[in-house]
Amino acid sequence: VPELPDLEYVVPNLRSQLVGSRIDEVRTRQPVVWRVAVPGTPDDALKGRRFSSVERRGHFVIFMLDPDRWLVTSLMLAGRFRLASVGEKDEGSLCAAFRIGDRELRYLDDLKMGKLYVVPAGQTDRVPGLDDLGVDPISPDFTRERFRAMAAKRRDQVRVFLMDKSAIASIGNAYADEILFAARIHPKTFVRSLSPELLDQLYDSTKRVLDEACAEVLRRGAPIDEKVRDFLKVRNRKGEACPQCGTKIRTTGVRGVDAFFCPQCQPATRSQFVDFRNLENTSPVGREAFEVAPAPPASGSRRRGGSRR
Ligand SMILES: [Zn+2]
């Protein structure tokens, strides 16, 4: 699942490798990924055009081509790009390939859920969701004031809010969990129940978690089709010890998707504190923390206030 920190690494990489070069041929292995809004086949629509830029908008990657074409890609859950040499064996997940001299830009997608849109340059309204993107959380436009104003209108759970691409463009499952862990907020908490202090904490955590992840993915310098996630603290770590308190990471369903969280660091309500103590699944560290102090003094009163609804 490419998320912003992945794309912030992949997009400049593709830009530096592709800008100035020309598409000689387009091969299609999985027609289901194409959405072509101009006459002809993908090959007709793209062959002979040159890459003038590669840009990210939210979770979309846009290949700008001269003359007058954009290839807009939405990678969804499993889409990724790879630069291969012509003649290299096709990957099982190969959906489409763009030949550029002796290289190929390949679009791989095990789930075939991603989409490749071909539109006249700038016609963003032809791509569902592209014109509806909210504020980019790693741009200067993502200000505390703007975040507060958006949150004030929300009637949903905090994880749903973070992942609403028309509000914030774009946070996926992995970083939603990491941000909520950093902010010490349970994923099912309703936005309107968050105190101003907790909302500020959520804003700060969003910026910090994404900034740090961007820096880490960049530092690793992995191949662009590889997803670097081993530094995440709670995502996909069910049953492992929380790095803060040692309690076992748990999951809870939010809109049918597993959210990973630490029940000690991200308590939902007072009653759930009692439930978790009885469940015997906390480590000695977690249990001691519970018995001595149910919540850190600095945030405990806010949290209790926040869950009284
Ligand atoms: Zn914890």
Image (tube, rainbow, N blue to C red):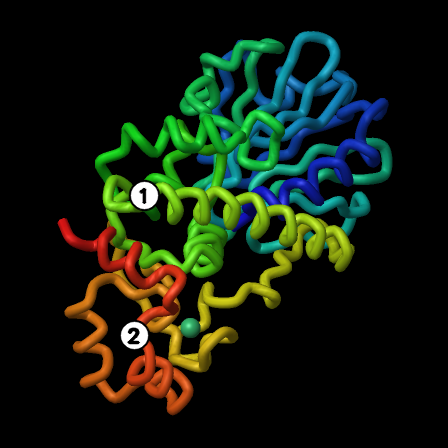
Residue 152 in the image: x percent, y percent?
Answer: 30, 31
Check disc 1 and give the amino acid type. Val
CB under 8 Å between discs 2 and 1: no
Query: Which is closer to the viewer, label 2 or label 1?
Result: 2
In the visual, does 200 lie left or right of 52? Answer: left
Q: Is residue 113 visible?
A: yes
Alpha carbons under labels 2 and 1: distance apart: 27 Å
The front one of 226 and 133 is 133
- Of helix, strand and loop, which one carries label 1? helix
Question: Crowding near pointer 2: few (<14 within 10 Å), some, many (20+)?
Answer: some
Taking the image in four quarters, ligand 1 sits in the one at: bottom left
Total labels: the figure holds 2
Check disc 2 and give the amino acid type. Pro
**Residue placed under numbered mark 2 in the picture:** 294
Look at the numbered disc 2 and say if its residue's Cβ is closer than 8 Å to ligand 1.
Answer: no
Residue 120 in the image: x percent, y percent?
Answer: 58, 9
Residue pictured at 39% horizontal, 46% vertical = 197
Q: Which mark is residue 80?
A: none
The answer to whether residue 34 is above or below residue 304 is: above
Q: Is residue 112 visible?
A: no
Quadrant location of residue 28?
Answer: top right
Residue 14 in the image: x percent, y percent?
Answer: 75, 37
Residue 115 in the image: x percent, y percent?
Answer: 49, 33
The answer to whether residue 184 is above or below residue 93 is: below
The front one of 17 and 201 is 201
Q: Which mark is residue 160?
A: 1
- Of helix, strand and loop, which one carries label 2? loop
Residue pictured at 69% horizontal, 54% vertical = 217
Residue pictured at 32% horizontal, 43% vertical = 160
Question: Crowding near pointer 1: few (<14 within 10 Å), some, many (20+)?
Answer: many
Residue pictured at 77% horizontal, 40% vertical = 13
